[in-house]
Image (cartoon, grey):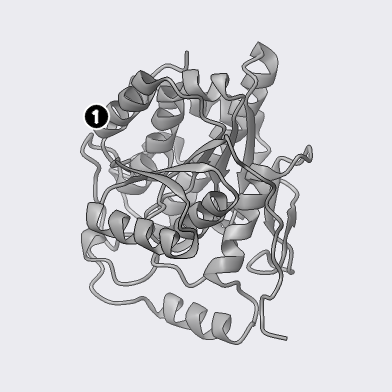
Amino acid sequence: MPPHSYDLTIPDLSTKRAVVTGASDGIGLRIATRLAGAGAEVIMPVRNSAKGEAAVAAIRDRHPRAVLTLETLDLSSLVSVAEFGERLCAEGKPIHFLINNAGVMTPPTRQTTADGFELQFGTNHLGHFALTARLMPLLRAGRARVTSQTSVTARSGSINWDDLNWERTYAGMAAYRQSKIALGLFGLELGRRSAASGWGITSVLSHPGVAPTSLLAARREVGRANDTGSVRMIRWLSARGLLVGTVDSASLPALMAATSTSDGEFFGPRWPGSAGGPPGQAGLWKPLRDNGAARRMWTVSEELTEVTVP
């Protein structure tokens, strides 16, 4: 039996509309492919149009009848997020699934977004916060299920409230961890506010475990000329079915979170250590259980992005 041979049954999603960020490669591409294969119309907002076109072609190779829409979105620019939201809201079509999946990881030196935020915090969290807020009318209309992709790094750590943008000191992994804790806190607070206010939105979290994606690979756009030693080790372990997952298996928790009818709020790989294994419900990690921090992060995010959730 080959390693990571488990899978997930996706229900029929005909008539449903999904938005998947980061769908041009890696886990996001796998998620978009599976949703399209189940009949959903998939909107693929991407920063790199060439990669996006290649991703669309790859999906249609597997699912010739796939209904796909390639859109332009740069989560590191609040102007780009606003323009994307305006285009979709002008169409007026309900959204049934939003997968907040895209991300950037550990630039070797501190970088900033177009709006001056530390790149990881600004992209991974604030970009998705603003995106969700901008799409709120369509999400409410579709009684959507919003899935926010956090990370195993969020098992520990905390929010650097005194220096959210890492202007005094910069530590790449600590900043990445914070961005993923922040996104997780937002996702949970979204669910609580929806339940309290009758928005009809279900908000859940997922994490992919550890897999050989491009996050730690050579990426000139984040100042990394070569693959890290970590990604080389992850590839070696993944190819042998040891400890970590594959890109395919790492996509399953988000797919389960998005399409499940269970009451679970957090989904991830089930092997010990949470780095790999079949998908299932998981217990919330300690940094994500602080409801006060979640309310504070919501308020701070509205202030920083100047986007208020209607």
Horizontal side of 223 relative to 90 (left or right) equals left
| Mark 1, secondary structure of its residue | helix
Residue at the spot 48% in from the left edge and 48% down from the top edge: 101
Horizontal side of 170 relative to 299 (left or right) equals left
Instruction: Spot the residue most to the front.
Output: 65
**Residue situated in front as seen by the camera: 170 or 130:** 130
**Residue situated in front as seen by the camera: 59 or 29:** 59
Residue at the spot 49% in from the left edge and 80% down from the top edge: 235
- The quadrant of the rendering that contains the N terminus is bottom right
Horizontal side of 10 relative to 97 (left or right) equals right
Question: What number of labels is visible?
Answer: 1
Q: Which amino acid does the dot numbered 1 rest on? A: Val
Answer with the quarter of the image where residue 34 lies. bottom right
x and y percent of residue 18 in the render? 51, 39
Asked whether residue 121 appears in the rendered view, the answer is yes
| Image vertical order of residue 176 relative to residue 143, above or below | below
x and y percent of residue 223 in the render? 22, 63
**Residue that label 1 marks:** 79
Crowding near pointer 1: few (<14 within 10 Å), some, many (20+)?
Answer: some
Asked whether residue 156 appears in the rendered view, the answer is no
Answer with the quarter of the image where residue 114 lies. top left
Residue at the spot 40% in from the left edge and 31% down from the top edge: 131
Horizontal side of 264 relative to 18 (left or right) equals right
Answer with the quarter of the image where residue 5 lies. bottom right
x and y percent of residue 128 in the render? 43, 36
x and y percent of residue 55 in the render? 36, 59
